[in-house]
Amino acid sequence: MSADFSAARADFPALHQTVHRKPLIYLDNAATTHKPRVVIDALTRFYERDNSNVHRGLHALSMRATDSYEAARARAAAFLNAADPAEIIFTRGTTESVNLVAQSWCAQNLRPGDVVLATEMEHHSNLVPWQVAARRAGARLRFVPIAGDDAEHGLDLDALDRLLTPQVKLFAFTHISNTLGTINPAAELCARARKVGALTVVDAAQSAGHEPLDVRAMGCDFLAFSGHKMAGPTGIGVLYGRRALLDALDPWQTGGGIVANVTYEGATWKPSPERHEAGTPNIADAVALHAAMDYLDALGRPALAAHDHALAAQATAALADIPGLRIIGPRPGSPRAGLVSFALTDAHAHDVVTFADQDGIALRGGHHCNQPLMRKLGLPSTVRASFYLYNTEADITALATSLRRIQKFFGG
Amino acid sequence: MSADFSAARADFPALHQTVHRKPLIYLDNAATTHKPRVVIDALTRFYERDNSNVHRGLHALSMRATDSYEAARARAAAFLNAADPAEIIFTRGTTESVNLVAQSWCAQNLRPGDVVLATEMEHHSNLVPWQVAARRAGARLRFVPIAGDDAEHGLDLDALDRLLTPQVKLFAFTHISNTLGTINPAAELCARARKVGALTVVDAAQSAGHEPLDVRAMGCDFLAFSGHKMAGPTGIGVLYGRRALLDALDPWQTGGGIVANVTYEGATWKPSPERHEAGTPNIADAVALHAAMDYLDALGRPALAAHDHALAAQATAALADIPGLRIIGPRPGSPRAGLVSFALTDAHAHDVVTFADQDGIALRGGHHCNQPLMRKLGLPSTVRASFYLYNTEADITALATSLRRIQKFFGG
Amino acid sequence: MSDFDDLYRDVILDHAKRPRNRGRPPTANRAATGDNPTCGDNCTVHLRLGDDGRVAAIGFEGSGCAISQASASIMTTQAKGKSPAELEAAFGHLKDILASGKTPADFDELSAFAGVHAFPARVKCATLPWHTALEALKQPDQPAQMVEGQKS
Amino acid sequence: MSDFDDLYRDVILDHAKRPRNRGRPPTANRAATGDNPTCGDNCTVHLRLGDDGRVAAIGFEGSGCAISQASASIMTTQAKGKSPAELEAAFGHLKDILASGKTPADFDELSAFAGVHAFPARVKCATLPWHTALEALKQPDQPAQMVEGQKS
Ligand SMILES: Cc1ncc(COP(=O)(O)O)c(C=O)c1O
Ligand SMILES: Cc1ncc(COP(=O)(O)O)c(C=O)c1O
């Protein structure tokens, strides 16, 4: 049985509201999660007490702000079991983290004829930046296919071995698919890539707040995630990179804070992490992300993962016998992250979301920033229910009831 | 006489604290300002009530979040008197805004032999990105010199005319110098640049929260500012660009949200503003920036500017006869933004800041991200006192008293 | 009436479930396809512009949400017999209704879309078939597809 | 004692205001320059490594805050007569003091820097002269500059 986090619901102010006169049932957590009181309080406290710019400042507030900001960095390093806080770069989120690597590392290292490998299940944010970078370098972008008609078997690992040629310089893949719910074997993928000398970039947007993460055990070179998908605020995220890689990487954004010495003619850079954080950083949200990481670790990340998996299993079971409903992704019994995507024969995803909203249930419908994958699955769009620690079995029962009514309304 | 904003002090929780058992006198506003209660409340309210991801979402919270985010965009357009909300791109701040133009516009448009023009008083964030972009394109970066030994005359406008050759494709300059306090004649600079067909990029980091801004009257093509320097939160800023320019500009960061159509092979882009905001934006901080803009407009931006200028005049007068103190920038009587940089013969900037901090006074000492300018002025560093609406003449009296004691402590 | 009931008025549900003029009329000599990549809606409109400069035949194909399907169906029923200018004018009325959320008293099935106003993200679903039809009208004539029954 | 008084202990103020060994000793045959671009501190250390492998003469030039000037002054007073290994060891002690903020009972003027611990941004000011001196020791010998008084 999974841990019971129902007491934690009280920590999330946004959950306690009604929508169309129904109690809110928020099942759009893969898009963004709600924030516990401690995270909101961290923001308020920073602005009420410690607010100041960081670095270079010598007055009391500035030293406090710097300490808080650097403590957040050390906390993120610990959260990922990174070797060194200097391996943590604060960004706006996963998308910016991926862009940093795709633009800076690729410009510096990718050559014509090289290959960047991705997978067929990447979010646009871990796909389009590689398309652009590969095109600029004259390199090719190739894809590890998904196996099975509804992608129920995850990545085709036999094809991966054929695709991992010595031309592959970098392998970018998602840890958890935001559309399928597939959990990829990240450590194994990294190990295979390492054998051909390819660096790995792991999109942990959907895993950072859900599964325990250990970058050293995983063996990845870069890893990206967003605070807002893990109980933290919008506007802050992390790029983890191995220290030697980050110190050798040219800065992507330039400006104040990253430079050792500047003349009118040129500039030299500080080491990581400063060299990769141009301008005033998002100080307050980094501090609030610290609070979010503390919050998740206090609940226990293995327990959070188990809770997610249990809800996913309950959801696939509850939805399985709704007429005309087709579930995408891992088969019942296979590991599945805390989300379920599905299509209804008689109702378009957007109609489903609008209807469920009337019942107070927040779902997402569309292509989930996964257009090529949707096309491959032969679906214009799906509906997605995604869970977080505060969701309960009752939420899933309500979802199933609403879906049955929707099926009648549009199919009848 | 300037308007009296002393009542507004009550709106800023962070001001009401003691530092080393002295009431805080915060004079580091050019680095970052404090935030009024309404801005902090806007953040709390968003996370407690409307929190959701934007775009593509069809449930109630998602629609509310989208509406709030787009209302912030429209508010920023009104704040700048821009013609169209689609001319507002939300970024992390000035630095990211400048990088967007420097990386995307220059890659697309700058050719070998072209010239980018900047000034000798640019902040590193409006300098280094142009160095990098010009080098990449094989273009040259040239500088409008400052006039006068202590830069007391601002930019050398005669030199500007000689420098504005038809090779100049882009002219990037700061509206207000964060080190000198000089207020550049932005509309005139834009008009002169337009005559040779050069686009203009205005760094409004120091003016957006201090002076009324009207991008159409100014006639600039791009303008950048940071929320955190104008009573708003960290992590959010704006790039204004003329619609036609933004719609023609290739996206710089790519990923979810900016694409019309994506295949495994490539992607097409949405129009502005979506095309320039890859990934989940910093929704909450955009909403809080909205509150900051409302706050400043309610006080009245012309009155804010007058207050700044009056404090600057009081400060230059109060500091003028401190022995061994040299003030940099506009001469007494000339227009000066709300900041004063100075050097003491017997005390190094960092010692001054540390000493003043003991008196509860927050100052900044160093090169203020202006290394080449400092070298040109023959100073290793300066001390800077910078004012905001909540500062008073009493703050300046306290500063002068503290500086006299410092002069004795280190010079005696 | 809740926003929801207002969105899915009976007229809309009726047209979504039993769309009129689905498919390609045999005499069609112009076509265009539009899509809304954000939600996956797509729509192809086939039509024949008669010698009198009016829509002689029209039909649609494609998939999408109830709003877009109903809008396509209603659009085709309205288009028949209209000149391009008249179709454009009817679209203008629809856009007014979508923008205002107001139901004009003297107006027909288009007023059913007033409820879409409260759902800005769905406005494009309602306008897609109209954009596509107007696009089709701009295409050059193509010989009507020769089908069995037309041979003489 | 406040953090401030602890930072600017009398020893430090004394050395900052009346630095010892400023300038280049006439016999110096090695030099290095270091800087701290963040705050504009810079420091040049000139020294002579004697035939016995010990610092025979040392002096410094440059500008900076009270902490860096005092540190340079105290460093030069400590360096004279020390071997490179002994200087390295003394720097190690300083770094321990800066890292811990603790004043070892049996220690000399270096303990005056314990107060810098509370000002992390100032730690580099205190270490700059030491880094520069150790760097100078690593330089190859250069003929001592011939100045008037040295001519025989
Ligand atoms: C004139 C000027 N330009 C640019 C910047 C950079 O702003 P930010 O650090 O918010 O990106 C600053 C502030 O540090 C500034 O004063
Ligand atoms: C798998 C995956 N990758 C990347 C992203 C992009 O994250 P963000 O929008 O926070 O940059 C998301 C979320 O939308 C995601 O689910």
Image (spheres, coloured by chain):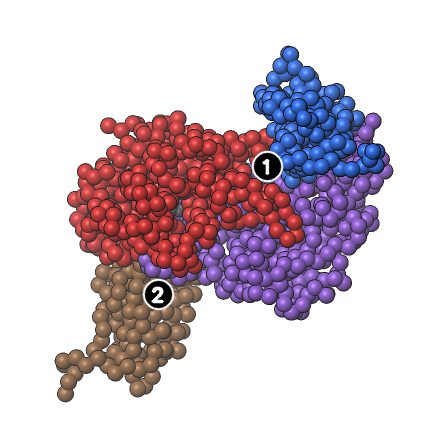
Chain colours: A red, B purple, C brown, D blue
From the top left corner, tell me how far across and down residue B408 is, in percent: 82, 28
The reply to whether the residue tagged 2 has its Cβ within 8 angstroms of ligand 2 is: no
**Disc 2 residue crowd, few under 14, some 14–19, many 20+, Cα 10 Å:** many
Q: Is residue B203 above or below residue A248?
A: below
Chain designation of label 2: C
Residue at 77% in and 55% down: B147
Q: Can residue A44 be seen in this view?
A: no
Residue at 31% in and 29% down: A303
In-image side of B25 versus A295 (left or right)? right
From the top left corner, tell me how far across and down residue C62 is, in percent: 26, 65
Quadrant that contains the C terminus of chain C = bottom left
Nearest to the eye among marks 1 and 2: give it.
Answer: 1
Q: Is residue A169 above or below residue B324?
A: below
The amino acid type of the residue labelled 1 equals: Val
Q: Which residue occupies the extreme front position in the image? A: D152
In-image side of A369 versus A148 (left or right)? right
Q: Is residue D86 visible?
A: yes
The residue tagged with tag 1: helix, strand or loop?
A: loop
The amino acid type of the residue labelled 2 equals: Leu
The residue indicated by pointer 2 is C128
Label 1, label 2: how far apart the Cα atoms are: 50 Å
Q: Which of B174 and A17 is in front in this view?
A: B174
**Disc 1 residue crowd, few under 14, some 14–19, many 20+, Cα 10 Å:** many
Q: Which of D73 and B316 is in front in this view?
A: D73
From the top left corner, tell me how far across and down residue D53 is, in percent: 65, 25
Chain designation of label 1: A
In-image side of A20 versus D13 (left or right)? left
Residue at 19% in and 43% down: A331
Callouts 1 and 2 on one subunit: no
The residue indicated by pointer 1 is A54
